[in-house]
Amino acid sequence: MYSYIIVDDEPLIRKGTRKKLESMDKLSCAGEASNGEAALELIRGKDPDLIITDMKMPIMDGTELLPVISSQYPDKYIIVISGYKDFEYMQHALRAKSIDYLVKPFSRQAILDAAGKAVEALDHMANRQKQMEMNESEKELLRFGYDKELLKNMLLGNHKGSMTPGSERLKFLQSCQGYRLVTMDLDAVFPEEDLDLFLSERQTHVYPLVLGYHGADNVGFLLLFFREASDKEIQTIVYKYIELLEGYFTGIARRARYGISGFHDSFDGLHEAFLETGSAFNAMAMRMNLPYLFSDRLPMEQVTLNWQEREEFLFRMEDGDAREAEKLLTNLFDYFAHSFCHLKTAKEYCISLTEELKELMPRELPVNRTKTLSLNLMNHLSVIFSFQELWEYFRIFYRNLAAMFQEAKVYGEKDVTENIRRYIEKNYWKDLSVEFVASLFHLNRSYLSSCFKQRVGVSFVDYVNSVRIAHARELLTATDKKMYQVAQAVGYENVKYFFRVFKKIEGVTPEQYRENGKKQNFDNGSRRSQ
């Protein structure tokens, strides 16, 4: 019999969930809690096997509770329930290795299915405990499997302490001179067991250890341990192993790319080695002759990206047009290929797009606008090793984001001129030509100009100038920015043109406007002091 607790601030939800689980023979409820703090106290007292928790709660919510459970009670299984089908909540649930994520209201069958998964996992863990009582050789296999899991966690930075191997094989490898890590990114599922068998049949002066990666089934690791070898010998042996791997993957119709770390002399350097291989992948271009890079031999040249369709992509996203945004995203990755930029540069560009989109999000959208979104994004990108994976990730990411923008209806007015006015007011500092704005709203230039003048009363250009000058007035009175800085901040690269437009609208030059403002503030202050 396994026990569970329910964490939810709504008593009816707790009662309903408990009722739905009554038919589970292997599960019994050990208690209920209304928030994360009470849940932690209940866990300490009752030691449940399964935790069913809501995300949005007072005092301590699910986003704070899940990391604590993951770090302090890693053996607990979790089912997350939420009133929101929210991308950020799902990310928290995934990082906490939750069994399932259910959106309220959920059916009896949904919670039974999720609980069934938990029971299966608990049964599996119980069986594994029994297997520890097997003979010594089988115990060694289990110890080795445990050591491998610990190595994987150390690689990814999930285990911060030192390692004391339990298996004889890992004790031997720990006594070696050191190792180099090869991270492999395949175009198919990584064949961990088959590759391990293939390499074990090769008698060399190197001791290979193959590790899979639970986070992505196409990624794997190869640790090459050296007993005694010079730097030159190590380099030569690594090259030979890359050739060996290439031959193996070609033989099974697979393609792979390799990031190779520097030399490390202890298991404590595993995560650093992993980051080094990530740097090697990040330095690869989409069209690259060699399938591998050494972290200590990375290309130094940098490519500056200037994607011409950036503003249109941002608009399509803000407009919630997922289909057009995906077409433009495809164009972006074609641009990456033709510009020969590195993967790191492409990641940084996609991050900059995401940051700009985050600033465009209406306040009412149920998406975290703090640094959390950026941190989660960075964590995901750290284990993306190819342009194809990057494309797949952002294709889904931006599709979900576009759906959220669509709900907000930022440009949902029936009158197209109102939508155009809103776009101008939100993007006044950008290059706003009639042709470009017309293309965004699927209009021709002439129709936009005549329609805008008829509905708004002024021409498109005059309206843009009026919005820009209004913001310039604020900057002139509220800041000490220089004139060229004010001009650039509101969308004018040519300072002389800015002066002409400002004087035409305000009747005075920008300097005179600032001086008049200072004088008026001084006079007002003098009157208040009298």
Image (cartoon, rainbow, N blue to C red):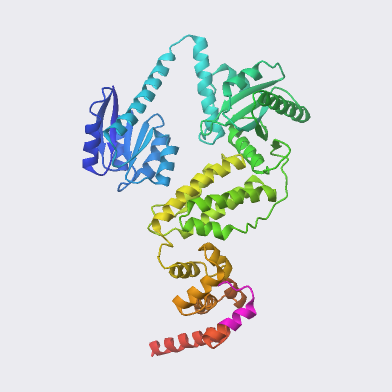
Judge whether 24 appears above or below 157 on screen.
Answer: above
- How far from the left and from the top, in percent, is residue 81? 33, 40
Judge whether 367 appears above or below 523 on screen.
Answer: above
Judge whether 396 appears above or below 164 on screen.
Answer: below
- How far from the left and from the top, in percent, is residue 504? 56, 85
Residue positioned 57% across, 40% down in the render: 389
- How far from the left and from the top, in percent, is residue 408? 39, 58
Q: How many marks?
A: 0
68 or 467: nearer the eye? 467
Residue positioned 60% across, 74% down in the render: 492
- How far from the left and from the top, in percent, is residue 132? 44, 15
**Which residue ends up furthest to the top in the rendered image?**
135
322 or 122: nearer the eye? 322
Say if residue 166 shows up in the picture: no
416 or 113: nearer the eye? 416
Say if residue 256 shows up in the picture: yes
Say whether residue 98 is magenta.
no
Residue positioned 69% across, 53% down in the render: 303
Say whether residue 493 is magenta.
yes
The quarter holding residue 162 reads: top right
If the image is split into quadrants, where does the C terminus sit? bottom left
**Which residue ends up furthest to the right in the rendered image?**
232
Residue positioned 21% across, 41% down in the render: 12
The residue stretch that appears in magenta: 490-501
